[in-house]
Every structure is written in structure tokens, then in C-alpha cells.
Image (cartoon, rainbow, N blue to C red):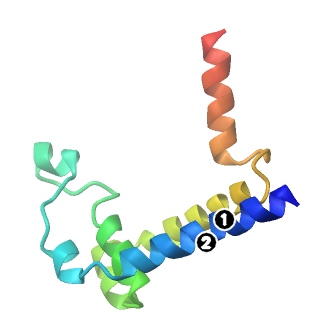
Amino acid sequence: MAHGRKLWGVGLLAGLSLAILWHVPLSWIDHGPNLCLVKAISGKECPGCGLTRAFFHLLHGEWRTALAFNWRCMVVFPILALVTFRNIINPTSKSILWIARGWQNKSKK
């Protein structure tokens, strides 16, 4: 029963977070400062440049604009959603996040 409550709580929190993010005006995102360290140093865009803007446009249903910012969003976000959902459902699973934590623990020994 406790697992079901936790699942509902996490689902509610995720839904509220997406609803809040949906209300952020796209003009704030599109015309905000560039936070990419690689672009600031080299002047060239890294593979991750535009993913935040692409995420917000995907959230608003603007697929073409999201693709224009970074086509990798169509690969990254479904994988991120799948890993997140899998960790919510079964937090002891051997997902990417848990493997990374295992490597950190082995290096400390």
C-alpha cells in the first residue's frame, strides 16, 4: 500500500511540475541568456545546445520549432522519460542511474 501512495505522490508532483513549466512563456526561454559553457568558450555549439528550448517547445506541442533548436530532443527526451518512469516504478532496477551510483561506490573502496 505504501508503494502505491508513493507512486501517486511522485506522479502528482511530476504532473504539477509539467503544468508549472507549461505556463512559462516561450519568449522567456527563446530570448534568454545562453548558459552553454562550451559555446561561451569556443563560440561553437555543443551537441546539447538548444535542448532546454527544445524541451519547452515540445511541452507546448511545437514539434517543428523543437527540432529546429536541436533534433536530438526526439531521442533524448523519450529516453529520459523512460528512465525516469522506470526509476519511479522500480527504484531498485538496474537502470543507467543506478549503475552510475554503483560505479561511484566501487571507486570509494
From what the image shows, is residue 26 above or below residue 48?
below
Q: Do the residues labelled 1 and 2 touch (CB within 8 Å)?
A: yes
Q: Which of 25 and 76 is in front in this view?
A: 25
Residue 44 location (% of width, % of height): 16, 54
Furthest residue in direction right, as rendered: 1
Residue 9: image tag: 1
The quadrant of the image that shows the N terminus is bottom right
From what the image shows, is residue 19 above or below residue 40?
below
Q: Name the residue located 77 percent from the left edge and 44 percent from the top edge.
A: 94
* Residue 11 figure quarter: bottom right
From what the image shows, is residue 61 above or below residue 106?
below
The amino acid sitting under disc 2 is Leu
Q: Name the residue located 29 percent from the left edge and 81 percent from the top edge.
A: 68
Task: Tell me the SS state at disc 2.
Answer: helix
The CA distance from mark 1 to mark 2 is 5 Å
Task: Tell me the SS state at disc 1.
Answer: helix
Residue 31 location (% of width, % of height): 12, 73
Q: Name the residue located 55 percent from the left edge and 75 percent from the top edge.
A: 15
